């Protein structure tokens, strides 16, 4: 009987020890804000963007409020010390969060601040895979590791909408403002070319009356026309049409558009907006379903908006017209032959009319916010938000 009791005791002891050995650890899972997609443009554009009002923050959210890579964790005990390491070896990016989880049983979300190599991100030109590695420590004890393979997009891919881990959709079309780069060194060359056409003698922004502001905008249009810009419908990214949580499209940078003399509706709008910002004229982008065009203000108080359909830049071939000189003016007055400037101005006026008509048609939807794809993206406001231009 004693032997049987001893055997039972030993068996129970072994069972308890076995249960302890296989007891599950803390429940945790990986959180990827934009799914398995990384957009370098988003990381660069929001690098210095403020996190928002701390009074409205969730007390169970810790770390980088704009973070893309984190975990959720059921806190196993009060005042648990946590260390979460995240790294993306292919991008030489890493970050660590150290802190304390105060409340027992609460679900915490933890996102370390990642230190990216921004110089590498802006150089990425095609979709590449990368591994995000998560390592979790609680009370200095190693808990485990998680790995997620992601797709790193080209710097030209601009996200517009994404669905987060709570299935909430976010409108981040202000990201298009990141492709407006008023500091691009190429702009100075374009402005010199614009001055050479004698449309205006100088660029002074709102130091001039609205009629002169209008002439400055035309001078920029004329310079682009002379470069032979053509409309290009290329907007797709490698993940367009796939079932991912981010909607995005390709946007060319200024130098890319100038080199190829091609621009889609977004390219042309951000290109034009970049130059207008440089000369002190405030532009804004008008997004409507499946299209974008440009708006700009004729006065500093923003009481007189005007609109421009930039895709019409390539509809007039200026190579068939003579320059605006004394001989050309004589020919024009006697024979009715237009000059380059006259033909360009005619196209400009038509583009303003088309842009104005499109805005009027979509004004009600834009003002009532009926469609998230019908909106105005004010570049000055985006800069105040902290949206940085992507440097080239």
Image (cartoon, grey):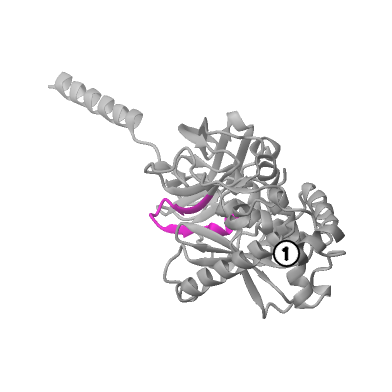
The relative height of residue 198 versus residue 111 in the rendered view (above or below) is: below
Farthest left residue?
1
Magenta region: 159-176
The relative height of residue 255 versus residue 313 in the rendered view (above or below) is: above
Secondary structure, mark 1, is: helix
The residue at 16%/21% (across/down) is 2
- Left or right, 214 with respect to 38, comes to right
How far from the left and from the top, in percent, is residue 346? 66, 65
Quadrant of image for the N terminus: top left
- Left or right, 77 with respect to 226, comes to left
- Residue 293: image quadrant is bottom right
- Is residue 381 inside the magenta stretch? no
How far from the left and from the top, in percent, is residue 380? 68, 66
Q: Which residue is mark 1?
A: 218
Q: Is residue 46 visible?
A: no
How far from the left and from the top, in percent, is residue 313? 63, 55
- Left or right, 176 with respect to 187, comes to left
The residue at 58%/45% (across/down) is 112
Disc tally is 1
Foreground residue among 214 and 135: 214
Foreground residue among 39 and 333: 333
């Amino acid at each position: 009987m004693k032997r049987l009791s001893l055997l039972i005791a030993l068996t129970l002891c072994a069972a308890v020890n076995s249960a302890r050995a296989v007891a599950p650890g803390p429940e945790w899972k990986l959180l990827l804000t934009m799914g398995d997609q990384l957009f370098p443009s988003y990381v660069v554009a929001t690098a210095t963007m403020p996190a928002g009002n701390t009074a409205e923050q969730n007390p169970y959210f810790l770390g980088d409020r704009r973070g893309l890579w984190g975990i959720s964790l059921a806190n196993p005990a009060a005042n648990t010390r946590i260390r979460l390491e995240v790294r993306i070896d292919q991008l030489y990016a890493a970050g660590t969060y150290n802190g304390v989880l105060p409340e027992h049983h609460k679900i915490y979300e933890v996102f370390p601040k990642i230190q990216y190599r921004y110089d590498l991100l802006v150089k990425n030109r095609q979709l590449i895979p990368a591994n995000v590695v998560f390592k979790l420590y609680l009370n200095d004890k190693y808990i485990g590791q998680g790995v997620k393979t992601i797709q790193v997009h080209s710097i030209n891919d601009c996200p517009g909408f994404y669905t987060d881990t709570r299935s909430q959709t976010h409108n981040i079309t202000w990201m298009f403002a990141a492709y407006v780069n008023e500091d691009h060194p190429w702009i100075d060359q374009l402005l010199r070319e614009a001055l050479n056409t004698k449309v205006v003698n100088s660029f002074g922004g709102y130091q001039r009356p609205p009629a002169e502001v209008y002439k400055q905008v035309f001078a920029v249009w004329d310079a682009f026309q002379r470069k032979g810009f053509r409309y290009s419908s290329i907007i797709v990214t490698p993940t367009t049409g796939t079932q991912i949580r981010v909607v995005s499209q390709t946007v060319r940078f200024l130098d890319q558009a100038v080199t190829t003399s091609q621009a889609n509706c977004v390219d042309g709008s951000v290109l034009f907006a970049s130059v207008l910002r440089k000369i002190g004229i405030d532009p804004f982008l008008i997004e409507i379903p499946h299209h974008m065009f440009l708006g700009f203000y004729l006065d500093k108080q923003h009481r007189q908006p005007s609109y421009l359909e930039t895709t019409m830049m390539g509809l007039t071939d200026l190579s068939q017209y003579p320059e605006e000189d004394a001989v050309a003016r004589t020919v024009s007055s006697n024979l009715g032959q237009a000059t380059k400037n006259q033909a360009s101005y005619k196209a400009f006026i038509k583009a303003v009319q088309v842009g104005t008509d499109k805005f009027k048609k979509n004004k009600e939807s834009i003002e009532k916010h009926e469609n998230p794809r019908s909106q105005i993206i004010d570049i000055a406001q985006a800069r105040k938000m902290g949206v940085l231009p992507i440097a080239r």
